[in-house]
Image (cartoon, grey):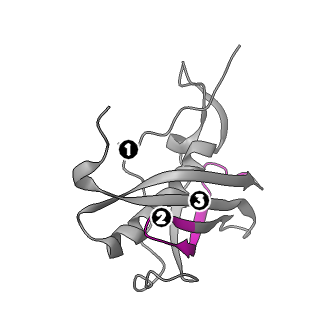
Amino acid sequence: MYTAITPISFNLPLVRFKSIQPEIPSFEVGKSVTERYPVTDKFVVRDLFSDQIIHKVLATPYVVGFMESTARDWALSFLGKDKEIVGCKINITHGSPALVGDEVQVTDTLIGKSSRFLTFKTLIRRLSDNKIVSKGEIVMSPVDKATWPPEK
């Protein structure tokens, strides 16, 4: 039987814990932002067609979603209301699984910034034992809301 991970729905609001940082760090290369997320049944590996749970571990699309959401919210707080952020490149590796009931901490560090691209080093740790769940790099691009998405 062919199985695949259910694609992330960006229309679903992510459940976040309150940021552990007292204020938003400035948006400069070398600065980081951290968010915490609970791992629930909503974020596990499921069959693409039946929605049946395959593994009760944090699914890759949600790993990426947590990484991108953390970076996006931080970037948008500095870019202005006329901007949006879109993903361009993802390169991640997995470490230890995060199980339902775990809490994970996402740390995104801005390592590159230009007018076209924002590059983040990203790390997800399981809070119970500080083990790495996933790490990597994501590249995102600021776009104008008025012209995004482009017409066909």
Q: Measured from the top left, where is residue 64 in percent x and y? A: 57, 51
- Which quadrant would residue 61 be assigned to in this image? top right
Residue placed under numbered mark 3 in the picture: 138
Q: Tell which tag, 2 or 3, sits nearer the viewer.
A: 3
Front-most of residues 22 and 68: 68
Q: Residue at x 35, y 42 (%)?
A: 11
| Circle 3 residues within 10 Å: few <14, some 14–19, many ≥20 | many
For mark 3, give the secondary structure: strand
Query: What's the magenta region?
Result: 97-119
Q: Measured from the top left, where is residue 9 in percent x and y? A: 43, 39
Q: CA distance from mark 3 to mark 1?
A: 21 Å
Residue type pointed to by label 2: Thr
Using the rendered image of the protein, determine whether residue 47 is visible from the camera's viewpoint. Answer: yes
Q: Tell which tag, 3 or 1, sits nearer the viewer.
A: 3
Q: Measured from the top left, where is residue 141 in percent x and y? A: 45, 59
Dot 1 or dot 2, earlier in sequence: 1
Residue type pointed to by label 1: Leu
Residue type pointed to by label 3: Ile
Residue placed under numbered mark 1 in the picture: 12
Is residue 27 shown above or below 49? below
